[in-house]
Amino acid sequence: MTLQGVVAIAVVAMVSGVGVSIASRGYHDDWLRAFEHAIDRYSTRRRTIDASVPAFALSADVERIRAATEARADALRRARAGAREGDVFSPAVGIALRRRIAGAIAAGGIDPKALLADMREEGEEWERPSVNGRFSWTTAAAMPPSIIAALPHLPESLQYRFVGVDLALVDVDARLIVDVLPDALPNRAAVP
């Protein structure tokens, strides 16, 4: 084979490698772009609803705060009556988030069984979360910082929370479950 033939093969291999790299980056960008788009749609809807319900105000009146929370949650439920699991955590987003969670757990030395045990000690037994359902802070685990760092950034009004082995996307002010990613914690078979 001539030197020109070797160079031509090397150039084709390099270009092919770049194509694979760009394609895999494109896939990553696609799921992240889809996730960000879903979050933007939800946030836009929420801003519209916030303008039509009682504003939150600092108050010692628990009932006033509860009424504002419930009004917001009820308005969101009506506006999202057709919301289904996977609207935000689409299949591609779910795959990517599960991988990121598993990586953060492995890198951070987090024990999923201990995380679940902490949830049980802090509150009642959990029920599987459901989209548009009420979120209970007593049945959710605080998110380890390494897992939060591995997940895409959220607006201030939203948080990720584990409820059992599932990951819930929670609207904090409305105490509303926006979406659920089932079996987000790895090694479910090892869970008590």
Image: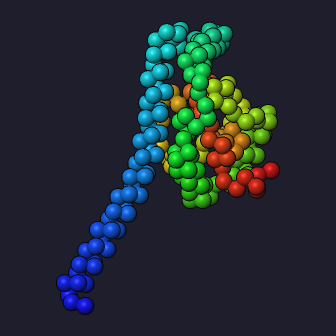
Residue 108 percent coordinates (x, y): 58, 56
Q: In front: 15, or 59?
A: 15
Q: In front: 65, or 96?
A: 96
Residue located at (47% from left, 33% from top): 38
Residue 114 percent coordinates (x, y): 72, 50
Q: Seen from this angle, which residue lies furthest bottom?
A: 1
Residue 162 percent coordinates (x, y): 65, 40
Q: Is residue 139 left or right of residue 2?
A: right
Q: In front: 9, or 89?
A: 9
Q: Quadrant of residue 168?
A: top right
Q: Quadrant of residue 76?
A: top right
Residue 173 percent coordinates (x, y): 56, 22
Count of numbered labels shown in the rendering: 0
Q: Quadrant of the N terminus?
A: bottom left
Q: Is residue 66 left or right of residue 100?
A: right
| Residue 81 against residue 115 in the figure, above or below | above
Q: Is residue 104 visible?
A: no
Residue located at (76% from left, 52% from top): 191
Q: Is residue 136 left or right of residue 59?
A: right
Residue located at (19% from left, 84% from top): 4
Q: Quadrant of residue 62?
A: top right
Residue located at (32% from left, 65% from top): 18
Q: Is residue 164 visible?
A: yes
Q: Seen from this angle, which residue lies furthest left?
A: 4
Q: Is residue 45 left or right of residue 185?
A: left
**Chosen colour scheme:** rainbow
